[in-house]
Amino acid sequence: MAALGALLVLTILFSATVGPIPIDALVVAKSSLNAIGIPAGITVVVQDLHLFGLTIPLPRPDLGYVYPFSFSVPRSAETIVRDLRLPRIFLAAVVGFALAAAGTVMQGFFRNPLADPSIIGVSSGAAVGAVATIVLFTSLPLQLMAFLGAIVAAFVVYAIATRNGTTPVATLLLAGVAIQTFLGAVISYMMIHAGQSLQEVIRWLMGNLKNSTWAEVEVTLPVAVLAFGVLVLYARDLNVLLLGEADAHSLGIEVERTKRLLLAVASIITAAAVAVAGVIGFVGLVVPHVLRLLVGPDHRILLPTSALAGASFLVAADTIARAGIAEVPVGIITAAVGAPFFLYLLRRREVHTV
Amino acid sequence: MISVENLEVALGEQRILTDVNLQVSPGEFVGLVGPNGAGKTTLLRAINGRLDADSGTVRLDGDRTAALSAREISRRVATVHQETNVQFAFDVATIVAMGRTPHRSRLGGDPTGTEQVEHALDRTDVAHLRERRISEVSGGERQRVFLARALAQDAPALLLDEPTASLDLNHAARTLSLVRELVADGKAALGAIHDLDAAARYCDRLIVLSAGGVVARGTPEEVLTSETLQAAFDARTIVTPNPATGRPSVTVLPRPATTGRRIHVLGGGSVAARIVSDLWAEGHRVTVGPVPTGDTTTTVARSLDVETLTAPGFTHLDDATLARARELLSEADVVVFADPVVTPGLPVLSLAEDVTRPILVEARPFSERNFAGEDGDSAYSRLQARSRPVTVDGVVDAVTDIPETSKPTDSSR
């Protein structure tokens, strides 16, 4: 796990050297250290949110920071690293972390190797929210709408699959597939009528991290960390659930309550990632599988290692995405790199177990 | 201590359990037997709280399970399931350690956990497998691993759902004797067991469940009778004491056809018993006798509702028995001599002197069956001369070959 943590730091530093203006690693390291801020105070700022013509005052915590390092580096380099590259890299790391963690939980929860973070309609819901905002309601905040779309879709799938307080996972899976298909139709219909904004819709649907800001990191990171903390607390329960619900019950797990909680938290962490980065496929499916091959099925180890590996993977993929002459959406890179690598593993080792 | 009172469980519209009452005390292994669909698994699930009762109560150590959390229940009762998903690569030690789940808080530790897990691994003789993946150990070893997990759970009661269903003889015996040992240590165990002989051998008491209700309960000897099994399983069975264990042993016979010949069997011992049950299974109307009261043939024939004439010994048959024997012989289409024993006075041979072309099945050499000296020799030679020799396996075919019209006694005179 320490190795994976180190790998993540190195990936981030390397990634920050890559770009239209190459910056050497030492400068990057110094600039990055300069950028580290320690929260030193909190004030609550009331910010107005404009939603459907209404103005809602929304309290938002605002943190004051203290910067412990001040190496001397060229100002232009520091600006590029600190304001352009690092926010994007950090967001990639957070999104990769979130998607891999959610994917691990979903695969364990469904006891199905094909499960990924969007299996219960989260990504489709986010996509409907985002596309609707781009095409129809341009005045609304896109990321918030995507997040809400994701949560609503997950909740609808859950509600459809639940009867008399129990939620069979097979029903949940099928309801998820059906809702995804339906939302796919809604998205396609909106795209036909997208006109000028079609380009933007496609960019979002393919997933990309361009123009990321520290503000996005500030919102996504706490959600991801908190949700991940809850998931780690439930790692043992996830292990026991792998043996089947009857076994889990007889070992004292409140099965339905635990399922509900895991599903909710995994959906929230996925929604937070998808809302800022769009639909980035394959991270949540492949990374957990690869780590399961390496560290085994025990979620106490699998969950944190998957999350760290997912962060490194997405940072690396996004670096490739922006390193070329013309930037491509990162979703294309994750799929194009991830799929062959996964097939290679599939041929070499048995990946049919969860 | 498990206690179930007036339990009723319905799944949807279907009522699965009706008015079930039972108690299992520490130091007691109670077997739950009954046909598929009788509600055995449902009963176990209602006891461990996986299913809610529609009415009635389940108590564990005096407290109603309805008022207990899953965690509290799992500290009082551990369950070994019929099948557990092992499509993953956990090692054996991790699986057994999962038994500690009910004793571990989410953030805190489990001070006695390691010790309990080690004890469970040793007790069930799977310690040497600790690093093996659960998906890679054999079915019998796997079941012991899940028993170890239940043991690590450190609950006073144990529920077992068909723990030996997919195991070979050795592993089944090993698993059940392990349960017996745990019971001897003071656990209360309730197990659904489909193998009646195994249930009879290892359980202190049996409860027979049929169509959702208890139809019989008691010691294996009290419960395993042809009558009870007929009622519960709708099956014809023969119950005999197992020669090795002395416990009841159950043999199920195929359902008979409704038509067939009238066949009278003379003889005794295992050969006659086998012939009677074979012919009965083919749907023939079989009668037997006279045979000694304690003979195997008597036990088998009685279980099949076959009319059986018994006599304390063969030397002196009373008049009533003789008269009834003659009647049966005259009504029979076919008479079968099953490895007959010849006793002084030749009562059986003289009784059947009139029978033409009987079927003669010989297993032991005649010298071992002759207790009547030279008289026996000559009478037996006459029997051999007029009968059809057939092997034990050939009896069913030989009987079918004989035309239905040839009534031996009618045509002889």
Image: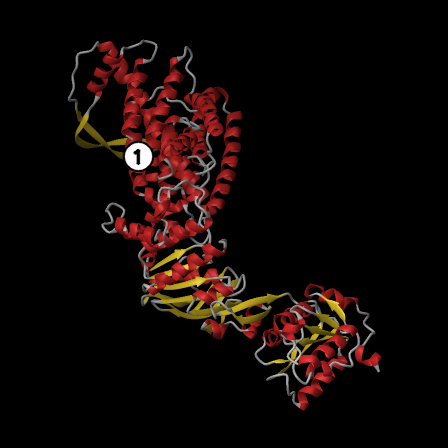
Q: Nearer the viewer, residue B332 or A207?
A: B332
Residue A54 shows in this picture: yes
Judge whether residue A95 can be spotted in this image. Answer: no
Query: To which quarter of the image does residue A72 belong?
Result: top left
Q: Nearer the viewer, residue B222 or A259?
A: B222
> Alpha-carbon neighbours of circle 1 within 10 Å: few (<14), some, or many (≥20)?
many
* Residue A349 image position (x, y, % from top left): 46, 31
Residue A193 at what x, y percent from top left? 52, 25
Looking at the image, residue B362 lies above or below residue B89: below
On-image quarter of the C terminus of chain A? top left
Inspect the image, locate mark 1, and give the three-letter code of the amino acid beneath it.
Answer: Val
Which residue is label 1 attached to? A223
Depth order, front residue of A25/B224: B224
Q: Chain of mark 1?
A: A
- Location of the N terminus of chain A (image quadrant): top left
Q: Residue furthest front?
A: B374
Q: Give the tally of numbered discs.
A: 1
Check disc 1 and report its element: helix, strand or loop: helix
Q: How is the image coloured?
A: secondary structure
Residue most toward the bottom? B319
Vertical relation: A129 (above or below) B284: above
Q: Based on the displayed image, in which of its 4 quarters is residue B324 positioned?
A: bottom right
Q: Residue at x 59, y 66 (%)?
A: B252
Q: Is residue B301 left or right of residue B24?
A: right
Q: What residue is shown at x 31% (from left), y 50% (from top)?
A: B101
Query: What percent of the width, then of the height, locates residue B322?
Result: 69, 87
Residue B82: horizontal and vertical position, in percent? 46, 54
